[in-house]
Amino acid sequence: MFHDPFTFAAFVIFYVTATASCKRAPFDLAEAESELVAGFHTEYSGFRWSIFFLAEYGSMFAVSGLAALLFLGGWPHGFLAVRTERRRPSRLLVGQSLDLVVFGGKCWLLVLVMMWMRWSLPRLRIDQVMMTCLQYFLPISCVLLVACASGC
């Protein structure tokens, strides 16, 4: 992510659009009064209602895992020199466990930033969301694609 400014800008655009695709604030669109008394808010309760929110948080973790793989370096930690010797399988297990913890920490950090954005920012109207995506993010991401592909 910090390799060059194009990659950092691509990460910011990816993360914002991923937040919007997960229907997190400020991109969750405000419902009308007739929609508040319909849908899964009133139809489901208890366990079935929690399944909707577990799916929402699961999509947040999936998007955060993809961002961690693409922009934050994935799972390598760089702390231990792990060799695949036959004499020391315990060192390999410790290294793999540390890789898993590092990757999970990166995912948790990105999910916490999504939650922080939800708590901090007000909702956007539908015209503001569409203007942001179509007039700003789409042209910027096309320019970033060309810039990163050309090796600038």
Image: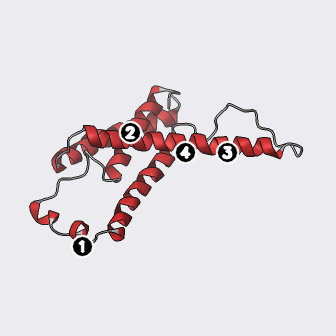
Q: Going by the picture, which residue comes out furthest to the front?
A: 46
Instruction: Look at the numbered disc 2 and give the secondary structure of its residue.
Output: helix
Q: Is residue 105 left or right of residue 34?
A: right
Q: Which coloring applies here?
A: secondary structure
Amino acid type at circle 4 is: Gly
Q: Give the residue displayed 46% in from the left and 51% down from the top.
A: 61
Instruction: Look at the numbered disc 3 and give the secondary structure of its residue.
Output: helix
Amino acid type at circle 2 is: Val
Nearer the observer: mark 3 or 2; the answer is 3
Residue tagged by mark 1?
Answer: 43
Residue tagged by mark 4?
Answer: 104
Residue tagged by mark 3?
Answer: 97
- Please tell me which residue lies in front, 84 or 73: 84
Dot 4 surroundings within 10 Å: few (below 14), some, or many (20 or more)?
A: some
Q: Position of residue 151 (x, y in %)?
A: 53, 31
Answer yes or no: do the residues labelled 1 and 2 have beta carbons within 8 Å? no
Mark 1–mark 4 Cα distance, whole angstroms, equals 34 Å
Q: Position of residue 17 (x, y in %)?
A: 35, 46
Residue tagged by mark 2?
Answer: 113
Answer yes or no: do the residues labelled 3 and 2 have beta carbons within 8 Å? no
Amino acid type at circle 1 is: Glu
